[in-house]
Amino acid sequence: MTDVTNVSVEPIVLRTAGDGYLVADVGGAPVPVRLRQCFPWSEPRRHLSLRDADDNEVALVTDPATLSATSRAALERALAAAGFVLRVTRVRSIDEEVEIRHWTVDTAQGPRAFQTHLDEWPQALPDGGLLVRDVAGDLYRLPAPNELDRHSRRLLWAYVD
């Protein structure tokens, strides 16, 4: 079984376009792609879905080590750009409305407000922390609830086990 799956039988070639975006050359045709990190969150640099503008998977890279050095370098640049995760330090409010949950938090980068779908629940991480994906696809990492202040814990209790 191969560690890189794509729509053709030829190996996938990745490169960074002049505008800085990742491009997958699949079957000789260049396809601009965006990176989507798949589970498990404990291995964020493996199991990478490359998706086109219509969110169709063009390729799945399960192990970047199987790529050529040039492709791996392009993938590493895309990972660095996509790997930005906001670190939450305090939860100020969580309000629900129709199909959306509104979050107001403090992060290491400053105050933020974001929205999640009601069926989007925080994902437990191996270290006890939580990961939340907002409607725009941005990631927010919360420490283990017992490491947060009392107000944050009170707001989160309904969303975690």
Image (cartoon, rainbow, N blue to C red):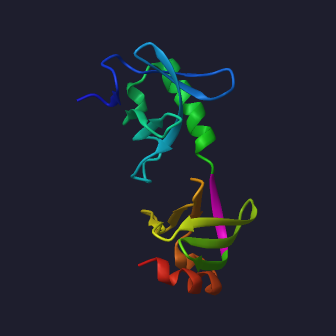
32 on left or right of 13: right
User: Residue 88 in magenta?
Assistant: yes
Left or right of residue 49: residue 22: right
Give percent across and percent down for residue 116.
56, 66
Can residue 10 be found in the magenta stretch? no
Residue at horizontal 47%, vertical 66%? 120
Who's the residue at 45% across and 63% down the image? 125
Instruction: Classify 52 as above or below 23.
Output: below
Magenta span of residues: 85-90
Above or below for 16 versus 92: above
Left/right of residue 80 with respect to residue 64 in the rendered view = right
Quarter of the image containing the C terminus? bottom left
Q: Residue at x 64, y 72 (%)?
A: 103
As drawn, the residue found furthest toward the top would be 28
Q: Position of residue 159 (x, y in %)?
A: 48, 77
Outermost residue, front side: 98
Q: Position of residue 35 (x, y in %)?
A: 52, 38
Q: Position of residue 143 (x, y in %)?
A: 56, 69
Decide: is 82 above or below 91.
above
Magenta stretch, main secondary structure class: strand
115 shown above or below 44: below
